[in-house]
């Protein structure tokens, strides 16, 4: 297993049929995530198609991450946390400034992680789309309001995704310190690419 340091990005191609494990090593750590078809990165994760197909804004075991062409990219084959966010988005220098004040603009954020890591694969800002936030707790209230609140994860919890294509994955181990998505204390995560075992 590879350890991705707190606040850091990571990327890899997960070959079709193999499984990517993402482990919340210390608990309450949000993991921002994008996925593309490695053979043609114009085919990339679509939050709208994923939510529409499963009729649910949260991801868990059985959820299929679908592309903008409505094709399966990855399937959640195991999830020991129970619920993950599709609508909270990625923090950026601009959103930090808007939400928390101009004094936070200098702080590193997920968009910057995605841009730095995506550049290794020829991706730029126009290739960034709405992302998945593994382990992030974004409840939707009866009145439609949503918030970013304390996580529901714990040390050692894992989400496992089977690649349905050769999948290019970008991860930002979220550096946010101004809201509770990381318990105000970003921590490392573990990632592993492996063969499937017992269907998971």
Image (tube, grey):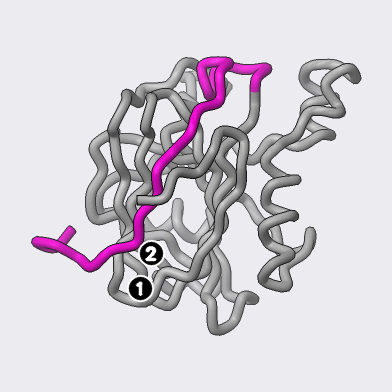
How far across and down, in percent of the image, does residue 3 sit? 44, 44
Categorize mark 1 by other alpha carbons within 10 Å: few (<14), some (14-19), many (20+).
many
Q: Secondary structure at mark 2?
A: strand
Q: Which residues are magenta?
A: 177-200
Classify residue 17 by image quadrant.
bottom left
How far across and down, in percent of the image, does residue 107 sit? 79, 28
Say if 191 sits above or below 40 in the image. Answer: above
Position of 200 compared to 184: left or right?
left
In this figure, which residue is indicated by the disc labeled 1? 164
- Mark 1 near mark 2, Cβ–Cβ under 8 Å? yes
Say if 194 sits above or below 76 in the image. Answer: below
Q: Residue at x 14, y 62 (%)?
A: 197
Q: Is residue 143 visible?
A: no
In this figure, which residue is indicated by the disc labeled 2? 74
Q: Earlier in the sequence, mark 1 or mark 2?
A: 2
Q: Secondary structure at mark 1?
A: loop
Q: CA distance from mark 1 to mark 2?
A: 5 Å
Categorize mark 2 by other alpha carbons within 10 Å: few (<14), some (14-19), many (20+).
many
List the single residue furthest toward the left.
198
List the single residue furthest toward the bottom.
39
Quadrant of the frame with the C terminus: bottom left
Q: Residue at x 38, y 64 (%)?
A: 74
How far across and down, in percent of the image, does residue 97 sit? 84, 25
């Amino acid at each position: 297993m590879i350890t991705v340091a707190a606040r850091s990005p990571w990327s890899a191609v997960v070959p079709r049929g193999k499984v990517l494990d993402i482990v919340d090593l210390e608990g309450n750590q949000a993991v921002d995530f994008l996925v593309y078809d490695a053979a043609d990165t114009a085919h990339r994760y679509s939050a709208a198609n994923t939510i529409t197909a499963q009729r649910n804004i949260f991801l868990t075991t059985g959820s299929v991450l679908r592309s903008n062409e409505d094709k399966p990219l990855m399937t959640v084959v195991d999830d020991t946390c129970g619920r993950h966010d599709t609508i909270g988005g990625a923090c950026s220098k601009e959103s930090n400034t808007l939400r928390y004040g101009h004094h936070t603009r200098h702080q590193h954020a997920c968009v910057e992680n995605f841009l730095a890591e995506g550049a290794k694969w020829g991706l730029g800002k126009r290739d960034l789309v709405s992302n998945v936030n593994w382990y992030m707790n974004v409840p939707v209230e009866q009145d439609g309001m949503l918030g970013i609140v304390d996580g529901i994860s714990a040390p050692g919890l894992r989400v496992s995704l089977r690649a349905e294509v050769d999948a290019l994955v970008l991860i930002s181990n979220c550096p946010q310190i101004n809201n509770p998505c990381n318990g105000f204390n970003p921590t490392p995560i573990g990632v592993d690419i492996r063969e499937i075992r017992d269907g998971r």
